[in-house]
Image: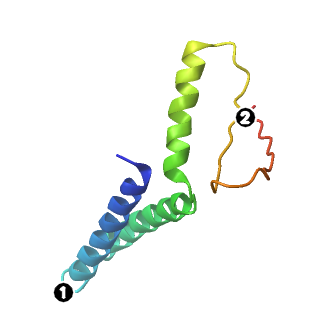
């Protein structure tokens, strides 16, 4: 499953949980403690969704992680990776970003 598909599924799950909780809360014998705990759970799921949804190229990053793991398995002496991500077919104006993972 692609990460973007997982986000779509998570969004649908959150919406379903919200809908179910609203229906439950309308019951005369609804437990305030249960509602409070479910609201906390839904809030945590929303925080996770919102954090992951900000990653515009989330599917690309998963492919990079897989490629990095494959390269590192082949050569455990690697100290880093150089990646060129093209946003269009034309042009050679690239930025350089250095990120230390240590």
- The answer to whether one can see residue 100 in this image is yes
Q: Position of residue 45 (x, y in %)?
A: 43, 62
Indicate the quadrant containing the C terminus: top left, top right, bottom left or bottom right. Answer: top right
Tell me which residue sits at (46%, 66%) in the image: 46
Q: Position of residue 41 (x, y in %)?
A: 40, 63
- Say which of 90 and 36 sits in front: 90
- Say which of 29 and 47 sits in front: 47
Q: Quadrant of residue 34?
A: bottom left
> Label 2 neighbourhood size at 10 Å, few (<14), some (14-19), many (20+)?
few
The image shows residue 90, relative to residue 12, as above or below, that is above
- Say which of 1 and 89 sits in front: 89
Determine the secondary structure under disc 2.
loop
Determine the secondary structure under disc 1.
loop
The image shows residue 25, relative to residue 77, as above or below, that is below
Q: Position of residue 51 (x, y in %)?
A: 55, 60
User: Which of the numbered marks, if any, corresponds to residue 18?
Assistant: none
The image shows residue 70, relative to residue 40, as above or below, that is above
Tell me which residue sits at (55%, 16%) in the image: 73
> Label 1 neighbourhood size at 10 Å, few (<14), some (14-19), many (20+)?
few
- The answer to whether one can see residue 30 in this image is no
Left or right: 78 as drawn, with respect to 56: right
Left or right: 101 as drawn, with respect to 36: right
Q: Quadrant of residue 40?
A: bottom left
Left or right: 13 as drawn, with respect to 71: left
Tell me which residue sits at (52%, 23%) in the image: 70
Distance CA(mark 2)–CA(mark 1)? 53 Å
User: According to the image, label 1 marks what residue?
Assistant: 28
Whether tag 2 and tag 1 are in contact, CB under 8 A, the answer is: no
Q: Earlier in the sequence, mark 2 or mark 1?
A: 1
User: According to the image, label 2 marks what residue?
Assistant: 101
């Amino acid at each position: 499953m692609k990460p973007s598909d997982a986000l779509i599924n998570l969004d649908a799950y959150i919406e379903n949980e919200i809908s179910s909780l609203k229906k439950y809360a309308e019951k005369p014998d609804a437990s305030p403690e249960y509602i409070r705990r479910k609201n906390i759970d839904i809030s945590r799921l929303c925080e996770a969704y919102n954090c992951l949804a900000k990653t515009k190229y989330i599917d690309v990053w998963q492919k990079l992680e897989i490629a990095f793991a494959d390269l590192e398995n082949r050569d455990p002496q690697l100290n880093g990776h150089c990646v060129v991500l093209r946003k269009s077919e034309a042009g050679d104006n690239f930025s350089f970003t250095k990120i230390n993972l240590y």
